Image (cartoon, rainbow, N blue to C red):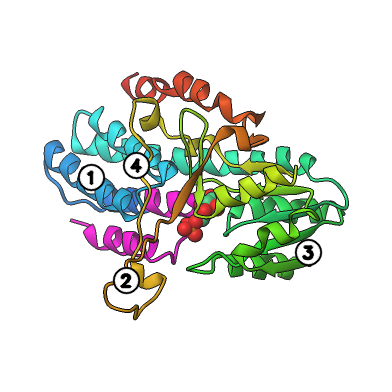
């Protein structure tokens, strides 16, 4: 059983060595596909059991990641629709490849569409590290738009440094601020642009903790707040009634030797309500967060149908 690569990938994801919803989804789905290809299971039942166990391990590595979960679930569904191990392996290979391709295509489309929303001279503030946002900003810069960026450092794990390194390497004038400095600079900002880990069916953006504070500050300063994300990050489980789970991480990330009896709370993400969000750039176009539920509803049977054909 090829648990080794799956375990390793789950651990890289859990430790944030692979971070950001898109990278997490791509590497998780690939690990599941690789393990399925190398599986030594003799019966379809054993193969599916192994596949489910691997999918479960990967999705538990970070619980607030529908793009990962959706890709894993599609692969498991594809296997269940097969008649024997050979067909199941072929279905999983096709499903994981197709999902990665679909996610990458959607990503490219988000950049193509989103770049129109960046104007020459814009000052943009971003939080954490979203590969969708950084690539969108780099595309705008490449088009000759003279943008400037504020990026937060993003405590406690400093993913803002990844953003800062990437943008400065691309030649984009970038200023790092501590997370609590967002209000101080907000009046100089034209657009707050964020990535997403998840969207709930009722239009809440789930992104790096601190996003909702930035959204409130942007509202108070009348600064437009937007999100760039692929619709694979929309969470179908929320349509079925679940709350989006919010990952809680080790308190050691905040303070490795805290005083005894001190409680530390370290959630990785928070929820920003749709009324604070101006627009969402997706591969389907620029939409309102209030449309997320509608898109999820239209989509829910499509995958099942594909594999049952
Ligand atoms: C990363 C984060 C990003 C989204 C979107 O958090 O909040 O905004 O994941 O990223 P973490 P992308 O560092 O905890 O994973 O646009 O790359 O999918």
Disc 4, SS = helix
Q: Earlier in the sequence, mark 3 or mark 1?
A: 1
> Which label lies toward us, 1 or 4?
4
> Which range is magenta?
1-30
**Residue under numbered circle 4:** 72
At a point 20% along the width and 47% down the height, the residue shown is 53
Describe residue 150's horizontal placement relative to residue 96 as left or right: right
User: Mark 4 vs ligand 1: CB under 8 Å?
Assistant: no
Residue 262, disc: 2
Q: To which residue does mark 3 refer?
A: 172
**Residue 216, percent across and down?**
62, 46
Q: Is residue 14 magenta?
A: yes
Mark pair 4, 2: CA separation: 38 Å
Q: Is residue 105 above or below residue 38?
A: above
Of the pair 161 and 305, the residue shown nearer to us: 161
Marks 3 and 2 close (CB-CB < 8 Å): no
The Cα atoms of the two marked residues, 1 and 4, are separated by 9 Å
């Amino acid at each position: 059983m090829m648990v080794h690569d799956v375990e390793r990938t789950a651990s890289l994801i859990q430790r944030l060595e692979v971070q950001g919803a898109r990278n997490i989804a791509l590497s998780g789905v690939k690990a599941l596909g690789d393990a399925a290809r190398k599986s030594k299971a003799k019966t379809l039942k054993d193969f599916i059991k192994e596949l489910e166990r691997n999918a479960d391990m990967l999705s538990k590595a970070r619980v607030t990641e529908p793009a990962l979960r959706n890709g894993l679930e599609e692969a498991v569904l594809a296997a269940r629709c097969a008649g024997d191990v050979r067909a199941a392996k072929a279905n999983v290979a096709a499903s994981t490849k197709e999902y990665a391709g679909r996610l990458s295509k959607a990503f490219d489309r988000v950049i193509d569409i989103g770049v129109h929303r960046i104007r020459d001279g814009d000052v943009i503030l971003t939080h954490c590290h979203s590969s969708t946002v950084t690539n969108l900003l780099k595309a705008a810069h490449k088009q000759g738009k003279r943008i400037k960026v504020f990026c937060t450092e993003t405590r406690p794990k400093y993913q803002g440094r990844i953003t800062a390194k990437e943008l400065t390497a691309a030649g984009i004038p970038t200023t790092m601020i501590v997370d609590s400095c967002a209000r101080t600079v907000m009046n100089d900002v034209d657009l707050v642009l964020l990535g997403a880990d998840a969207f709930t069916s009722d239009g809440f953006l789930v992104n790096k903790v601190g996003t909702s504070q930035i959204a409130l500050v942007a509202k108070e300063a009348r600064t437009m707040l937007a999100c760039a994300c692929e619709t694979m990050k929309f969470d179908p489980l929320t349509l079925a009634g679940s709350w989006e789970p919010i990952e809680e991480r080790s308190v050691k990330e905040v303070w490795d030797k805290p005083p005894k009896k001190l409680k530390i709370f370290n959630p990785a993400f928070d929820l920003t309500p749709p009324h604070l969000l101006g627009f969402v750039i997706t591969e389907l176009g620029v939409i309102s967060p209030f449309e997320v539920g509608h898109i999820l509803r239209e989509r829910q049977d499509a995958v099942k149908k594909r594999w049952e054909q």
